[in-house]
Each structure stands twice: as C-alpha cells, then as structure tokens.
C-alpha cells in the first residue's frame, strides 16, 4: 500500500511498524478477542498496556522517582490553564515568549488572574530566534518559569536552558519530547501533546515533580487538578485508552532502535543534512538564527511566494506532502519528527536540488 | 481471528465491520498514503472526515439547526465542570441523583460555587429506581435541571423525561446516546463520552442549544468554555482525530442498519429477551424497578456471591466476558450496547439457562 513522506507539523507521521502492529491487533489484541478500544480501562489486559507504556516512557527519559507520569486529555491548551491553577500559589510567573503557543499560554495565565512577567520575546522578528536571558532577569519569587522548548511554527529550539536560579522550570515539549536526551530533573513539569513525537492526538503526557502536586485551590475543577489524576494513576475517569496504546507502541519502537541517545543522533543527522544543504545555496533561505535551529521543524523560503507554491505543488507530485509553512511565516516547513525516516529527508533534498536547478 | 462477546460497561464492544474498515485504512486511508492518526487536523482530507462524522450524527439524531455539535475531550467528568461554569449565570441548579455519576456531577457543581438542589434521589435503595418528580418540585429560577438518562452501574433509565416547566434540561447520555430515538429539542445540552455507544474513549460529544453558548464568566479557562469550541468548529486545538474518525465509522454503520428507529427496535428486542427470561425464573433477580429498566445495562444476581462468581467464571470459558457487576452492586451486569449482536444476548441466555439447571 502506498505511503507518502508526510512532513506534517502535527498530527504527524508514525513509524510504519507501529501502524502494522496496530493493524494486526485490530480485530483481536493478542488472544483478548477484542480490540484495545473495546477494553474496559479497568481490565487486567488494559492495565498491562497502560502500565507498560508508562514504564517504557520512564525508562526512555530516565524519569526519576520523585516525578509522576500522567496521561491526560485536552492537549497543551488545557495545560496552559492547569499550570497556573495548580502552581500559582503566589500568583506570579515568568514566561519567555517564543511564538503563538507561548502567547496563548501567557494569555491563559493572565485570564486566570496571574501576574505574568514576559521576561523576553522574539516577536519583533516573527520569533526567528530564542531570546537569551541573564539570571538577573529571573524573579526568584515567581511560582514558575515557563518556556516552549521547541517552536513548531517557527522552527526554533532552546539549545541551552535558561538558568532560572532554582525557580521551577515548566516546558511545553509538545514538538520535541523524546527527540533527544533531556535531564528531567531540570524541570518541574514537562508536558506534551502526543500528536507529534508520541502517537495519536487525544493524549497529553505530563511529567510532574511530585511536590508540585496538591497545591491547587478548592475551586479548581476536579479534572484540572493534577492531584486528581496522580491519585488515580491517570484513571480518575476513562483515559484515552487507544491513544495511550499507540503511544506505547511508539515507546517500544524507540526502545528497540536504542532509546533517546540513538534517536538524538538520527535526528541530528537528519537535520544536518537539510541545514547543511541550505547553507550551501542562496536559493533557499531559513529565517531562523543559526544557533537556535530546531531539529524537528525546519522552515525555509524561496525568493518569491510563487516559487514557494510551485515547490509545494511539485513536492506533492513526488509524494512528499504537508510541506506548506504556517500562514504566519509563509514558505515551507519540513517537520522531521522521530518517525520521519532519513530516506524522506534525502528525498526532500534531492527534490530541492532539482527544483533549484530548474528555477534559478 | 477469535472474537468474544464483550459485555463491558465501557469502553465496550464495537461493530466488527467498523474495526475491519479501520484495519483496512491503517497503513493508508484511501489514497492519502497515511493513516488518519497521521493527518493534520487542518488538512482537507481530515476536514472531510470530521465534517462527515458531524453531519451523520446530525442526521441520525435529527439535531435541529439551533444546536451546535461539539467534539471535545475530557469525558463526562469535564462536562460536570463545564455545565455550571457555562450555564450557572444565576448560580442555582437542580439535579436528580440516580447514581455515582450524578453524585459526581452534583459535587462538582457545588465545588464550583453553585447552589445545588437535589430534587430527588434513589440512593436509599442503591439507586434501584428512577425517582419521579412533580412539576411543583421544579424551581423555575434555576439555571438548569440535570439528569443522567441511563445509569450504567445500576441498570436504570429514564423512560419518561421529567417536566421541567421550561427550565433547561441537561442530560448525561454517556451510556444510551444513539440507542433510541430522542427529541433533541427537549434538551438544552446532551453530552456523552464516546466509549459506550459511539467509539473509542477520548472524545466527548456535546450537543448544545446555541443560546446556551457565550455566557461563561471571564475567568473560565478557555478550554472549558463552550464558546471556544463552537467558534472554532471543534478545532481550537488538535481534536482527538482518530477517535472522531472511528466514531464516524460507527455513525455510518448505524445509518446503514436504518438509523435510530431501527437500532431502538433491535435494542428493545435484545433487552426484552433478557428481561423476559429473567421474569420467568427465580434463579436470577434484577434489583431494578420494572418500569425503569435500562435497555443498555442489565444487572442481575444469583442467590449467593459464590454462585455469581461461578457464573462469571463459566461465562468467560464460553467467551462471554466482562459480565462482573459493579462493586457497589455485586452480581452481574450485561452491557448490551448497540454493537452487541442479538446472537451475543442469545448465547448469554442459553448459558444462563444451562447454569440455572446445573445449580438450582
């Protein structure tokens, strides 16, 4: 069956072996006589699926014992509210504004009554770089310090973390979780929607230091309180069972190929192929500061929007799809998450060369 | 491949034809070259999937134009908060307490500052019946009047709706949506988690009268405001794309077999087979008041818990699984949602007769 190279920013491509396993399990998961979607979330067979997924994630990221792993719903947008509602004890927080998603997170914290200090922003250049801050800019009296580790729309990424002088660091890792080795202990909360590097949309992974749980006010809705889900092992109500199952298959696939050190190397190699080629030509330009380049989302433009459109159209004819850039930037965006094979990147570069030769 | 008869209360059995279609689409949906899970939710191909699912649901339930259909996340438990947060303008609501889920809904409304009047409850008999109210009990000054139309744990169901004298009726239809014809105009909001009669866990359908949208306070989190999702056509952030796709396949299956009038007849026939048999024997007892019997969840007990355990064990040996009753009632529960074929019900009755003969 035909498969395309799918450069979608999210939901995005999954390993074909994962899809094949899901296909094999569709009519009956092992000898259960039913699909995972049909299983009671309280059944032993499903219990093993969710427990294994959780443990595999713990293994992959080397998550320490003083952290809780939660499988929630509602996407990053729900985290934008849950974070101030659960952590905003003093009512003050600092954010670095690196794009549309941090802007939404900032707006939500303000809406919920937080005093928000936007420490730095790169909005002046349509978020083409990651602002660097000095530790003097950190307000040690803040409840937390918030960043988005990778910015899907603009193709920027935090290569080094800001020094927050002990203030709890929160990271939206929706678009680069599991793409490289991270030190979980550097963060108070890591959260990510699954639909880029983990699996189907509909499950949000939250990795939270245990001391940050249990501080929500009494009027916080039950479902927006981390404590609810922590106490219930992500089973306060029916979790998104099938999405967790598919994410679990992705975790197994990652373990099999060597875990995060291995995938980091692969991702660095894939991104280097693209960036190195772009650095040799004037035909394609990437708007992103070189030191802040994302390994996951690579944005680039031709000299005119007509050329961009022709590029995207020609790529689709060669079964390379979803290369159109976000409307706020125009041009192209190649999202090359974990599951994008290096052959897909190579095919893209071959086409870029061909298109350049035909149009320069 | 072996399939069992799965009597799970939820997540629960799906039509095998739906699973086969999902299996066929797994490596490539039609000629897209990718699975539905891998599609951008903003892509035309996914747009057609969600639009078709929505229209099919509108067709099936004959949802009038003055209602909005939303595909949300967070399950019924999130609706317990969203309803008071969006509708609690005067801060007063009435609830009929018919089980564990209405208790949770009541607790959540109180937590969020609502003045809650529990008009009637059947808690005195472990929720074995639906309390009937008179219209004099309705406070016309309430923001809304709340019921759960079917009570999964106890096997009771509202056969007739209470007369709420024009007060907005809210119904948690998680366990009987699409099981029979309903008049949507009788309700202000109908909501349901998908995982019983619609599809995989992780998507919550909300059918809401349009005038009830847009009344949330400014401090209500964006994701808990119906207006957010209504304005964005359920695409404010990435929706649970795959769950919606599978629900869409279930809607198509329902249309093919004749829609709600046809499935209602099938469900009445299935339930009648079981209840009629139980009414002929003293060996099995159902704790539910005859006039309030659910068509979806049928609870019954033998004379001792040892017999119950033996019954459940013996059923599993015959590939009839998840018949154990909820811990609050004990005994057995056969959930016979839309996708349970009549052959499954017949097989259960054959086994019940056999078990009775061997043990009475």
Image (tube, coloured by chain):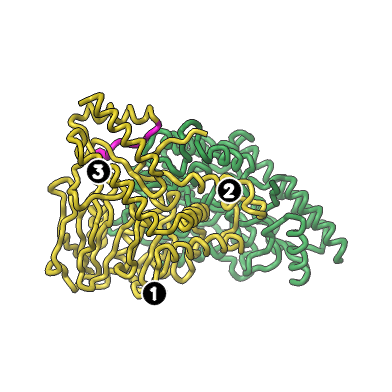
Chain colours: A green, B yellow
Residue for point 31% across, 54% down: A222
Residue for point 29% across, 56% down: A217
Report the residue marked by disc 2: A197
Q: Quadrant of residue B222?
A: bottom left
Report the residue marked by disc 1: B66
Foreground mark, 2 or 3, reads 3
Q: Spatial distance from mark 1 to mark 3, Cα to Cα?
A: 41 Å
Q: Which residues are magenta?
A: B319-328
Q: Secondary structure at mark 2?
A: loop
Residue B3: which disc?
A: none
Chain bearing mark 2: A
Residue B268: x and y, percent?
A: 31, 51
Residue for point 52% across, 61% down: B50
Give the side of residue B184 with respect to residue B257, left or right: left
Sort mark 1 into few (<14), some (14-19) or many (20+) by Cα contacts within 10 Å: few
Name the magenta segment's main secondary structure. Answer: loop
Q: Given the current orientation, which residue lies at the most extreme top position?
A: B358
Residue B172: x and y, percent?
A: 31, 58
A249 lies above or below B192: above
Residue for point 58% across, 35% down: A255
- Depth check, front residue: B101 or A180: B101
Report the residue marked by disc 3: B276
Q: Secondary structure at mark 1?
A: loop
Chain bearing mark 3: B
Q: Are marks 2 and 3 in contact (CB under 8 Å)?
A: no
Asked if marks 2 and 1 fall on the same chain, the answer is: no
Q: Spatial distance from mark 2 to mark 3, Cα to Cα?
A: 52 Å
Residue A149: x and y, percent?
A: 56, 54
Chain bearing mark 1: B
B355 lies above or below A249: above
């Amino acid at each position: 069956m035909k498969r395309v190279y799918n450069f979608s920013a999210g939901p995005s491509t999954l390993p074909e072996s994962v899809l094949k396993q899901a296909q094999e399990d569709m009519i009956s998961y092992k000898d259960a006589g039913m699909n995972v979607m049909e299983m009671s979330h309280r059944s032993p067979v499903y219990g093993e699926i969710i427990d294994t997924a959780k443990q595999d994630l713990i293994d992959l990221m080397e998550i320490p014992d003083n952290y809780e792993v939660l499988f929630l719903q509602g996407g990053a947008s729900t985290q934008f509210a849950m974070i101030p509602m659960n952590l905003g004890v003093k009512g003050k927080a600092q954010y670095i504004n690196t794009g549309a998603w941090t802007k939404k997170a900032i707006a939500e914290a303000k809406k919920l009554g937080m005093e928000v200090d936007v420490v730095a922003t790169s909005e002046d250049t349509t978020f083409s770089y990651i602002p660097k801050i000095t530790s003097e800019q950190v307000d040690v009296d803040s409840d937390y310090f918030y960043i988005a580790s990778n910015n899907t729309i603009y193709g920027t990424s935090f290569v080094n973390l800001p020094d927050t002088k002990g203030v709890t660091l929160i990271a939206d890792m929706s678009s680069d979780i599991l793409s490289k080795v991270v030190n979980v202990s550097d963060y108070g909360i890591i959260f990510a929607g699954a639909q880029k590097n983990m699996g189907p949309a509909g499950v949000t992974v939250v990795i939270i230091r245990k001391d940050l749980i249990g501080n929500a006010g009494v009027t916080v809705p039950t479902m927006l309180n981390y404590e609810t889900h922590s106490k219930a092992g992500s089973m306060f109500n029916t979790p998104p069972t099938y999405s967790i199952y598919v994410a679990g298959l992705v975790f197994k696939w990652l373990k099999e190929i060597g875990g995060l050190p291995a995938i980091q190397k692969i991702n660095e190699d894939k991104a280097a192929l693209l960036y190195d080629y772009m650095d040799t030509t004037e035909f394609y330009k990437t708007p992103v500061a070189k030191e802040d380049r994302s390994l996951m989302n690579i944005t680039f433009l031709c000299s005119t929007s007509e050329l961009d459109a022709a590029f995207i159209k020609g790529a689709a004819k060669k079964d390379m799809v979803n290369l159109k850039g976000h409307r706020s930037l125009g041009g192209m965006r190649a999202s090359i998450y974990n599951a994008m094979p290096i052959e897909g990147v190579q095919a893209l570069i071959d086409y870029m060369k061909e298109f350049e030769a035909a149009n320069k």
